[in-house]
Amino acid sequence: MLIRRYQIGGPAMTIAPASQLDAADPLAAFRSRFVAADDPSVVAYLDGNSLGRPLAVTAERLAGFVAGPWGRGLIRSWDEAWMAEPLTVGDRLAEVILGAAPGQVTVADSTSVLLYKLMRAGIGARAGRSEVVIDRDNFPTDRFIMEGVAAECGLVVRYLSAPHDTGVRPADVAAVVGERTALVVLSHVAYRSGFIADMAAITRAVHDAGALMLWDLCHSAGVVPVELDACDVDLATGCTYKYLNGGPGSPAFCYVATRRQEELSQPIWGWMGASDPFAMGPEYRPAQGMRKFISGTPPVLAMQPLKDMVELIAEAGLTAVRQKSVALTEHAIALADEVLAPLGAVLASPRDAAERGSHITVDHPRFAAVTAALWKGGVIPDFRPPDGIRIGLSPLSTSFAELERGVEAIARELRDHAGPH
């Protein structure tokens, strides 16, 4: 029996294999709160950082919503609760997940739409500056929208480059920002490598240049503690269908620091962001505070699953969630070193837990074919070009045994696909 070692915020500890890790896991009981967590047709679900499992209570909540607020309350429910829902859910997200005071977060739109709104708002607040900054390895949506906004506004995009297995560091940002920089856009956790950027130091470097900072929190919200207020962040956005388990297409959230709300003007002037939506007035007058960052009718129905997951994270405690995340990724790296590295696979994520989110990526030239075969057999990681399998670990729904089964299956398929590349 192999004994593995990893470290969680203290001296190195000798850790037994998966069965013992699961037996000692203080969060193990939370797994039963998720739908079909032990469905035998799914050998290992290692893609919770793309789409989180649904909570069992979500079906009850949705049925109750249809029968009650929607079915009986009908349009009256807008006055009773729904008009405030984007802001009340936003405030709870801010409290439990984002390290932010009330009045700075709203839930609405998709991540893409909110990125567009916040980019345009940030650039508009720095009129006369001619450059925006983003890294080449950022998620395609972030890069594509930044390029589109730059073309729309006549700006130059400055690109940062970072090592394949880590990400952008404060010195990289400080080297490119200056008096021409309007806005910098980065992901807090890199979608491929899992690298955690130094939010406080990078934001400080951007502010020293007089620019604004926009953080994408898609791969950190709900699994990596975030302190938006303490880090003096200007703008942030993120999705809710990964570690926040809101379901496919669930709405995104956006954060605008209180000190920035009056100086920023978002570009999509929808009626729900007006100061008096039901006045049906002849001209647009923005609402005060975060309401002005809402455009169209909020997706109230799609917010309901999110509310349950935020409360589950509050019950577990984000610190405990992070501790298990570290334990899972350490175990994943130990397994990768043990059974995948001898087959030619290479870790493409940080080994330092302080610099790593809740997923790791392992590269091998045959992983595209391996991933397709794994899915057919009920082992579900995801593939990220050019040759990476990404192992996403959701601490409240993923067990150590599930992780171990998944990595062992990857090794088996890799051996089965041995041969010329």
Image (spheres, rainbow, N blue to C red):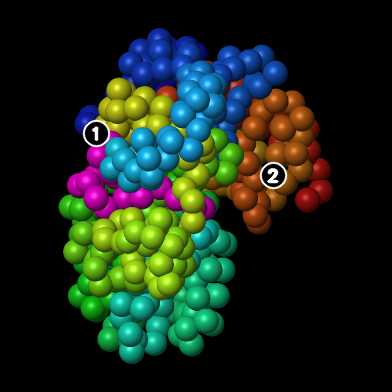
- Read off the residue under disc 2: 367
**Magenta stretch: residue 368 in it?**
no
- What stretch of residues is rendered in magenta? 93-110
Residue 318 picture location, percent across and down: 29, 32
On screen, residue 17 above or below 235: above
Q: CA distance from mark 1 to mark 2?
A: 33 Å
> Hey, what amino acid is under mark 1?
Gly
As helix, strand or loop, the secondary structure at mark 2 comes to: helix
As helix, strand or loop, the secondary structure at mark 1 comes to: loop
On screen, residue 263 above or below 1: below
Marks 1 and 2, the one that precedes in the sequence: 1
Identify the residue at horizontal 49%, vertical 71% (top origin): 146
User: In this rendering, would 86 be left or right of 199?
Assistant: right
Report the disc number at residue 193: none
On screen, residue 93 above or below 131: above
Residue 284 picture location, percent across and down: 39, 70
Residue 394 picture location, percent across and down: 46, 31
Report the disc number at residue 9: 1
Residue 294 picture location, percent across and down: 41, 57
Q: Nearer the viewer, residue 278 or 265?
A: 278
